[in-house]
Image (cartoon, rainbow, N blue to C red):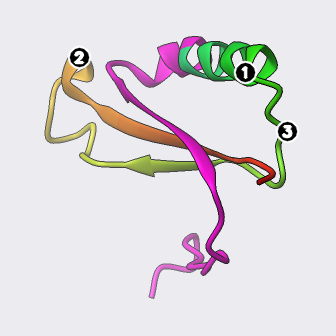
Amino acid sequence: TDPEMEVKTFPACKVLSFIHKGSYQKLHEAYAFLLKYMQENNLEISGPNRELYFNDPSEVSEKDLKTEIQIPIKE
């Protein structure tokens, strides 16, 4: 019911996934790691990335935040 929220269903796909623990300010380091891995293994992006947030920053400390990054890749 929140007008700021939008729910979308994405089609199933193969993804490269990484779970980052810590500050959102450090997510760029996880992305850099994933992109380097993709380049070294000749993987290609096939769609927009996704981020899944496993906890709430108002309920846990910054160091305990968990975020899963998913980058869809071509099969």
Looking at the picture, how far across and down is residue 1, in whole percent?
45, 88
Q: Which residues are magenta?
A: 1-29
Instruction: Name which residue type carries label 3.
Output: Glu
Numbered badge on residue 16? none
The quadrant holding residue 24 is top left
Numbered badge on residue 35? 1
Nearer the observer: mark 1 or 2; the answer is 1
Instruction: Name which residue type carries label 2.
Output: Lys
User: Mark 2 or mark 1, which is nearer the start of the sequence?
Assistant: 1
Relative to the observer, which residue lies in front, 44 or 68? 44
* Alpha-carbon span between mark 1 and mark 2: 23 Å
Whether the residues at callouts 2 and 3 have beta carbons within 8 Å, the answer is no
The secondary structure type at the circle numbered 1 is helix
User: Mark 3 or mark 2, which is nearer the start of the sequence?
Assistant: 3
Numbered badge on residue 44? 3
Nearer the observer: mark 2 or 3; the answer is 3
